[in-house]
Image (spheres, rainbow, N blue to C red):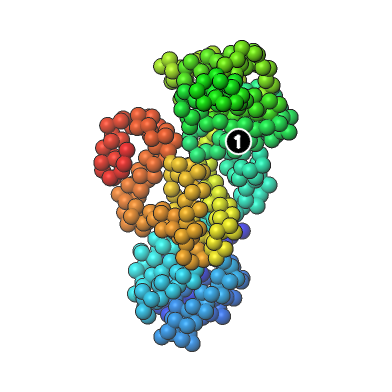
Amino acid sequence: MSQMTEKPRLLIVEDDEGLQRQLRWAYEDYDVIVASDRVGAIDALRATEPAVVTLDLGLPPDPDGVTEGFATLEEILRLKPDTKVIVASGHGARESALRAIASGAYDFYQKPVDIDTLGLIVARAFHLHAIEAENARLAAAGSGGETVLGSIVTAAPEMLKVARTIERVANANVSVMLLGASGTGKELLARGLHNASGRAKGAFVAINCAAIPENLLEAELFGYEKGAFTGAVKTTEGKIELAEGGTLFLDEVGDIPLPLQVKLLRFLQERVIERIGSRRAIPVDTRIVCATHQDLEAMIAAGSFREDLYYRLAEIVVRIPTLAERHGDATLLGKHFLTRFAKEMNPAVKGFAPDALAAINDWAWPGNVRELENRLKRAVIMAEGKLVTAADLDLDLSSEGAELINLKAAREMADRRAIRQALARTEGNISNAAKLLGISRPTLYDLFKQYDLQA
């Protein structure tokens, strides 16, 4: 294959021969194809399938209007919807820009052409097209875009490795601890483990240890006899007992108070429980899966979590990556959620605007998959057009310098993104984020002040 055909293909639709020559010279890094009218543009589109098209709206036989240009735009997107079309016109620029973007164009620029500005727009368009193409490839490939463990949608090697680990330990008679930030899907993984195990016909019983007041948590876990305390009007089985023959999922296990940790440890050692108000030992056969976003080893060192309980619960430890660490999954999951929510709530929504895809790819996702799901649900409900925009997602990153004009701006964008990702991975812990970034805590605070970021 020649060097020319290895370059990204750029189709320039422009009837001004002088401007054709100027653009061809300016874009020597691309495989440039030129067309002068709609027929030539569509022929070139079919023959070369360019990733990006720059389209002058004033084409013959209507060089002083935009009719022919919009007809060309419509036909390009009908034949190859993933093409990034950048339209240009000197005729009623604002009105044409709004109409073009609403029709599916990637971006707009006004004549006379500024080669440097247009070059930035073209480069961004190629970058976004490459991201979308890679996500499509992963979704279609047998090794990517899988639905694993029944409900986990992923194409990321990091998450596929987690799924394979869970599948391998599903039938082993061991306790499993899932470690990961909030919103990474710990309960979904726990359910997947249960469903892949020999206990799948039994109950999957989940309890969030952080959501229940300390004085009620023991009753929720172990149950109680009638009259055991004020309000105990009937004998009630606890969550452990209800999980007989199945799986008990203890979410946020780090929030269990120390006195109750002793009782839980006794159950794990003896596999019998006693309800509150009773001395009758009840044998229970259940598999324990637990999860936390806390640093249990640090809690052990501080004396707030029992080391012997930790080793009983953590026979197998599985660390779950953040969404920022799951390369390509943000866009893949975004499309998955959009399809689901559009079907349920707003069938008029058909996809993402280019700025939304770019924003999803660039955002650090401190709230992980839960944040992405919630933003998509709100965006689908609130979207006024067929395409969800970055504004609908409340992820408009234009203020961060979408059009980079110098190295300083590029460095600032990179710094901002790295800081967001570090904070996401460390659950907002400033000291750990600074350590991850390889800088001191005071330096990180200086960057917060410099870039007007929130700690």
Q: Where 241 sits versus 354, above or below?
A: above
In terms of depth relative to the viewer, which is nearer, 255 or 370?
Answer: 255
Q: Where 329 sits versus 59, above or below?
A: above
Q: Where 17 sits versus 289, above or below?
A: below
Residue 76, x across and y down, in percent = 55, 72
Residue at 41% x, 58% y: name it. 391
Residue 66, x across and y down, in percent = 44, 81
Residue 82, by quadrant, is bottom right
Residue 106, x across and y down, in percent = 46, 65
- Left or right: where does residue 149 sit relative to residue 207? right
In terms of depth relative to the viewer, which is nearer, 327 or 130?
Answer: 327
Three-letter amino acid code at the position of disc 1:
Leu
Q: Say how many tags the image has.
A: 1
Q: Is residue 422 visible?
A: no
Q: Secondary structure at mark 1?
A: helix
Neighbour tally class for label 1: few under 14, some 14-19, many 20 plus, Cα within 10 Å:
many
Residue 124, by quadrant, is bottom left
- Label 1, on which residue? 189
Residue at 59% x, 59% y: name it. 343
Of all residues, the one furthest to the bottom in this rendering is 61
In terms of depth relative to the viewer, which is nearer, 357 or 391?
Answer: 391
Quadrant housing the N terminus: bottom right
Quadrant housing the C terminus: top left
Q: Is residue 439 visible?
A: yes
Residue at 39% x, 66% y: name it. 118
Residue 135, x across and y down, in percent = 57, 52
Q: Where 265 sits versus 63, above or below?
A: above
Residue at 37% x, 32% y: name it. 429
In terms of depth relative to the viewer, which is nearer, 117 or 175?
Answer: 175
